[in-house]
Image (tube, helix red, strand yellow):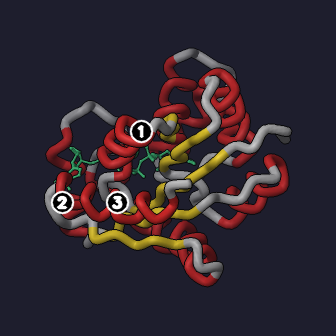
C-alpha cells in the first residue's frame, strides 16, 4: 500500500488495439508514467529472473500471469518512477488482478479507457508489427483473443457499471484516436 495520493488510469483493450501507441502519446502530452505490464513481464524474462521461465510460457500461451507477480512489478516501477500519475496499460486483465490491486494498493482508478477494435483489425496490426514478440503468431493470437473475451471483457463491464469506463473507437488512424482520448482527459483536468 502507499500513503501518497497516486493517480491511476487503467488502459484496456484487446491485443493489438493500440494501447501502447496511445499510452505513449498520453504520457508525453499529460505527464503520466506509462507502465505496460506486458513490457514489464518481458523485461523480467530478459533479466533472467527466477520467474522468467514461468512468465515466458504463460505469455506464449496467452495466459494471465498471477497478480502476485504483476503487482510486484507494477509496485517497483511506480516507486522507481518518482511520479505520482500512472497509465497502467494492459492490466487488470481479470477479476483476480482487479481485486488484488485494489486490496493491496487501496487505489481505485480515476477512470478506465477501453480501446475498442474489431478482431480482424487487431489481427492485422499484430501480424504487421514485426517487433519479434514471441506471442505474435497466429496460434497465440487466437488464444490472446479468447482470454481477452473470457477474462478481460468482464473487468471492462465491471468499470462500465461503475460509470468509470470510457470506450473509444480504436479502429481509426492513431492520431484520430488520440483526439478522442484528449476529449476525455480534458474533462478530468483538475
Ligand atoms: N497501431 C496502433 N494503433 C494503430 C491505429 N490506430 N491504426 C493502425 N495501426 C495502429 O499496436 C499494435 C500495432 O498496431 C503496432 O504495430 C502499432 O503501430 C499499430 P500497440 O499500440 O502495440 O497495441 P497494444 O494494444 O499495446 O497491443 P499488444 O500486443 O501490446 O497488446 P496485448 O494486450 O496483447 O499485449 P501485452 O503486452 O499487454 O500483454 C502480453 C501478454 O502478457 C498477455 O497476453 C499475457 O500473457 C501477459 N500479461 C499478463 O499476464 N498480465 C498482465 O497484466 C499483462 C500482460
Ligand atoms: Mg502493448
Q: Quadrant of the C terminus?
A: bottom right
Res 143 seen here? no
Marker disc for residue 27: 1
Q: Going from the N terminus, do you reach mark 3 or mark 2 first?
A: 2
Residue occupying image coordinates x 50% and y 55%: 189
Q: Quadrant of the N terminus?
A: top right
CA–CA distance in space, label 3 to label 1: 12 Å
- Please say if 153 is above or below 76: below
- Please say if 142 is above or below 166: above
Q: Going from the N terminus, do you reach mark 2 or mark 1 first?
A: 1
Marker disc for residue 19: none
Label 3 neighbour load within 10 Å: few <14, some 14-19, many 20+: many
Q: Nearer the viewer, residue 31 or 46?
A: 31
**Does any atom of ligand 1 lie closer than 8 Å to the CB of label 2?**
yes
**Residue 17 image offset from top left, x and y in percent:** 31, 58
The residue identified by callout 2 is 176
The residue identified by callout 3 is 181
Residue occupying image coordinates x 71% and y 47%: 67
Residue occupying image coordinates x 51% and y 35%: 33
97 displayed left or right of 42: right
**Residue 159 image offset from top left, x and y in percent:** 60, 74
**Residue 78 image offset from top left, x and y in percent:** 65, 32
Label 3: which secondary element:
helix
Specify the quadrant of the image occupied by residue 98.
bottom right
Amino acid at each position: 500500500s502507499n500513503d501518497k495520493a497516486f493517480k491511476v488510469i487503467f488502459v484496456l483493450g484487446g491485443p493489438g488495439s493500440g494501447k501502447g501507441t496511445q499510452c505513449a502519446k498520453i504520457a508525453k502530452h499529460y505527464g503520466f508514467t506509462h507502465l505496460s505490464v506486458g513490457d514489464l513481464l518481458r523485461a523480467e524474462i530478459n533479466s533472467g529472473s527466477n520467474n522468467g521461465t514461468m512468465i515466458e510460457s504463460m505469455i506464449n500461451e496467452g495466459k494471465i500471469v498471477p497478480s502476485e507477480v504483476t503487482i510486484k512489478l507494477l509496485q517497483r516501477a511506480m516507486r522507481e518512477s518518482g511520479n505520482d500519475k500512472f497509465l497502467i496499460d494492459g492490466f487488470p486483465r481479470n477479476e483476480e488482478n482487479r481485486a488484488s490491486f485494489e486490496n493491496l494498493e487501496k487505489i481505485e482508478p480515476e477512470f478506465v479507457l477501453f480501446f475498442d477494435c474489431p478482431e480482424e483489425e487487431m489481427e492485422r496490426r499484430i501480424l504487421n508489427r514485426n517487433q519479434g514478440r514471441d506471442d505474435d503468431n497466429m496460434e497465440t493470437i487466437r488464444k490472446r483473443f479468447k482470454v481477452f473475451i473470457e477474462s478481460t471483457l468482464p473487468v471492462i463491464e465491471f468499470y462500465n457499471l461503475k460509470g468509470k469506463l470510457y470506450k473509444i473507437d480504436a479502429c481509426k488512424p492513431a492520431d484520430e484516436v488520440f483526439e478522442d482520448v484528449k476529449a476525455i482527459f480534458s474533462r478530468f483536468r483538475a
